Amino acid sequence: MKGANVLDRNTVLQNISNKEKVGGIIWIVVASIQLLIGLTYNWVTLLIGIWNLIMGITTITNAGKMEQRANNIVEAYEKNLTNIIIFLVVNIFIGGIIGVIGAIYDLVVRNYVLNNRNVLLGNVNPSYNGTSNKYEDLEKLMKLKQDGVLTETEFEIEKHKILR
């Protein structure tokens, strides 16, 4: 079944780790360009490049520690929106388009984590153990989707379990 991996916590954690590694590489590339420009033209860009280099290295390092971070990953990503916005604004004015791409990519990773919140927190049960009334269960499931608790993929997977 397409999308079944959404329910597998280890797969979601591995996907987050991979996405964070890519994000770290993006920030290191951004930093390298900024460092080169900063050495030649502008000390402010040099400082931003150092900041982004540290961010890139930290991101890659943290991606390798996914198991230690797994229980707090949702909370961490819920709190990091401000940091991403700061990086976005700074890079809009000083860092250039590549820095903006890095910040947007970080927003995409954050969105992935928050969309898989239930899987990461263990709130999605892969086996259906609902009530005997499938229609009531489908109504409850639809309400969860409308309230933003479930993603479209999670909704389809749970719906398929109920209708089996």
Image (cartoon, rainbow, N blue to C red):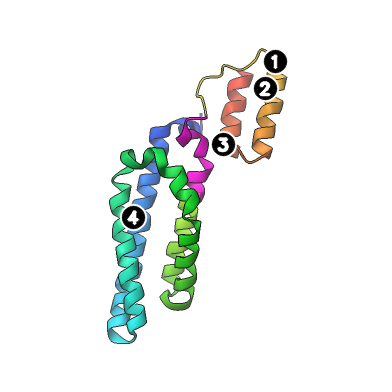
CB under 8 Å between callouts 3 and 4? no
Q: Which residue is mark 2?
A: 137
Q: Which residue is mark 1?
A: 133
- Closer to the chain start, of discs 3 and 2, is 2
Mark 4 is on which residue type?
A: Thr
Residue pictured at 50% horizontal, 39% vertical: 117
Q: Residues within 10 Å of mark 1 (few under 14, many from 20)?
A: few
How far is the residue under mark 3 from the one under mark 1?
22 Å
Residue pictured at 49% horizontal, 70% vertical: 89
Residue 24 vertical placement versus 12 (above, below) = below
Estimate the x, y position of residue 91 in percent, counting from the top left.
Answer: 44, 72
Mark 2 is on which residue type?
A: Asp
Inspect the magenta stretch and tell me whether residue 118 lies in it.
Answer: yes
132 and 62: which is toward the camera: 62
92 and 70: which is toward the camera: 70
Side of 94 relative to 156 (left or right): left
Residue 131 vertical placement versus 15 (above, below) = above
Q: Residues within 10 Å of mark 4 (few under 14, many from 20)?
A: many
The extreme bottom residue here reads 41
Displayed quadrant of residue 31: bottom left
Residue pictured at 40% horizontal, 45% vertical: 16
- Closer to the chain start, of discs 4 and 2, is 4
4 and 103: which is toward the camera: 103
How far is the residue under mark 3 from the one under mark 2?
17 Å
Q: Which residue is mark 3?
A: 153
Side of 10 relative to 6 (left or right): left
- The numbered disc on residue 59 is 4
Residue 35 vertical placement versus 55 (above, below) = below
Mark 1 is on which residue type?
A: Asn
Q: Which residues are magenta?
A: 111-123
Q: Residues within 10 Å of mark 2 (few under 14, many from 20)?
A: some
